[in-house]
Image: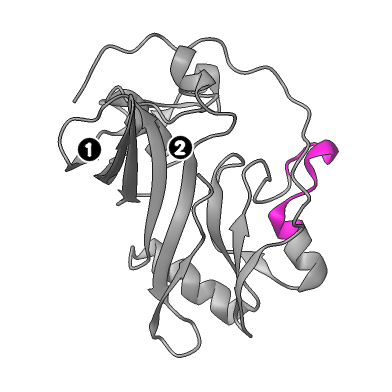
Amino acid sequence: MTEAMPPLGAMPESFDYHPPTEPWLSIIHLDDDLVVLDKPSGLLSVPGRDPALSDSLAKRVQARFPGSAVTHRLDKDTSGVLVMARNKRALAHVGQEFEQRRARKAYVARVWGDVAGESGEIDLPLATDWENKPRQRVDHEAGRASRTRWQVIGREAGVTRLQLEPLTGRTHQLRVHLRAIGHPILGDVFYATGEALAAADRLQLHAHWLEFAHPGDGHVVRYEAPLPF
């Protein structure tokens, strides 16, 4: 399921940051330990270094629920489920769920082209592309092991809808893996080109659900964010 891909162009130019404000917060679940959110595309998970990038999901949540802390992040242009912990015990617990790979998560993506087959796994090592940071790249010599499980859940004209389950947690993993097999995610300003880039006005990648043991009672919970596309 590979095909020749055009070379990536220059890095996207600096942009004006205009994060969405309506709704200000979309809360999926709230209890004494967690606040689970549906992060919109275009909003940073945490503040950037530049003061112009200070607005973020984390800051918005902390203004309403002081002491809350991020347990994981989503790329600015990725939407979907993001969990913040409301106390140190919950933060440590959820952090361990991710670190020990007990947490499971699935994304939905719309990708360019007709993906051959119905399911499979991408196993390609990834490393930072230092000359084009923050881009990442496949690197068979210095890359870290990276695995993504995929399943076709829908087909359109020249576009495939996939459910993606990252088995490792590398930066831009899903975006680079799909680009590497010839099926970049639609609207991806870092890894798509030409028609694939122009096919959507936002990155077509959404964190659909997240499953882990709750820090309160240890029971496995699953939180879902409705699909926006």
Residue at (51, 28) in percent of width and height: 188
Residue at (46, 15) in percent of width and height: 195
Residue 158, quarter of picture: top left
Residue 228 position, x and y percent, is 54, 48
Residue 63, quarter of picture: bottom right
Q: Mark 2 sits on what residue?
A: 172
Residue lying farthest bottom?
217
Q: In the visual, does 226 lie left or right of 143?
A: right
Q: Is residue 73 in view?
A: no
Residue 180, quarter of picture: top left
Quarter the N terminus occupies: top left
Residue at (55, 78) in percent of width and height: 90
Q: Nearer the viewer, residue 163 or 11?
A: 163
Which secondary structure lies at badge 2?
loop
Residue 113 position, x and y percent, is 31, 24
Residue lying farthest right?
51
Amino acid type of the residue that numbered disc 2 sits on in the rendered structure = His
Residue 53 magenta-drawn?
Answer: yes
Q: Mark 1 sits on what residue?
A: 123
Q: Nearer the viewer, residue 159 or 217?
A: 159
- Note whether 13 is above or below 93 in the view shown: above
Query: What range of the chain is rendered magenta?
Result: 48-59
Residue 116 position, x and y percent, is 17, 30
